[in-house]
Amino acid sequence: MRREDLPAPESGLLLTHFLTVADVPRSRAFYSDVLGGEVVLAENPCIVKLANSWLIMNPGGGPTPDKPDVTLRPPADPGTATSFLNIRVADIERCYREWSALGAEFLTEPIDRKAELRCYLRDPDGYLIEVGQATGLLDGILADPPAGQG
């Protein structure tokens, strides 16, 4: 483990994303073997460097002194999401083919949303991951409005 691989800025801030997972080795394998991340620390917590960001993963658990009223657990309902990872790529068709071949299960093929091409997949715990490639947005074309808003 090298210091420069850790999410530890020398000044300012750095954004990471924490995932509560049911099975650390399974999730670690998904984010490294399927999505191409680099395992920085295998356990306690698991840290995977993915492109220019880091994912930190640990099993769930009850309250701790610094979060006295919070219990962590993986998503319980795959039909409901309150947040998701958003991965931006240069070539979504290539990512779709390569990640599918490595076992990623996408909800749909990439769909043209005018501003971008995008599709979604789930990780082993059911976390939703958006994969998008900017297209029309680069020319000022915005996406279709969200469902039910026009």
Image (cartoon, rainbow, N blue to C red):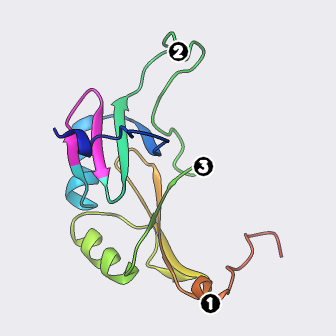
Q: Residue at x 40, y 73 (%)?
A: 89
Crowdedness of circle 2 by 10 Å Cα count: few (<14), some, many (20+)? few
Q: Earlier in the sequence, mark 1 or mark 2?
A: 2
Residue 123 horizontal side relative to residue 34, left or right: right
- Please, what is the three-letter code of the amino acid marked with disc 2? Asp
Q: Nearer the viewer, residue 125 or 141?
A: 141
Q: Main secondary structure of the magenta part?
A: strand
Crowdedness of circle 1 by 10 Å Cα count: few (<14), some, many (20+)? few
Query: Gap in Å between the C-alphas at discs 1 and 2?
Result: 46 Å
Judging from the image, what secondary structure is the residue with disc 3 in? Answer: loop
Instruction: Report the residue marked by disc 1.
Output: 139
On the image, the x and y values in percent for residue 64 come to 48, 12
Query: Gap in Å between the C-alphas at discs 3 and 2?
Result: 27 Å
Residue 145 horizontal side relative to residue 88, left or right: right
Give the residues in magenta. 39-49
Instruction: Report the residue marked by disc 2.
Output: 66
Judging from the image, what secondary structure is the residue with disc 1 in? Answer: helix
Query: Gap in Å between the C-alphas at discs 1 and 3?
Result: 32 Å
On the image, the x and y values in percent for residue 25 come to 21, 39
Instruction: Report the residue marked by disc 3.
Output: 80
Residue 113 visible to the viewer: no
Circle 3 or circle 2, nearest the eye: 2
On the image, the x and y values in percent for residue 10 come to 38, 39
- Please, what is the three-letter code of the amino acid marked with disc 1? Asp
Judging from the image, what secondary structure is the residue with disc 2 in? Answer: loop
Residue 47 in magenta?
yes
Q: Quadrant of the C terminus?
A: bottom right
Q: Is residue 128 above or below residue 18?
A: below
Q: Residue at x 45, y 49 (%)?
A: 127
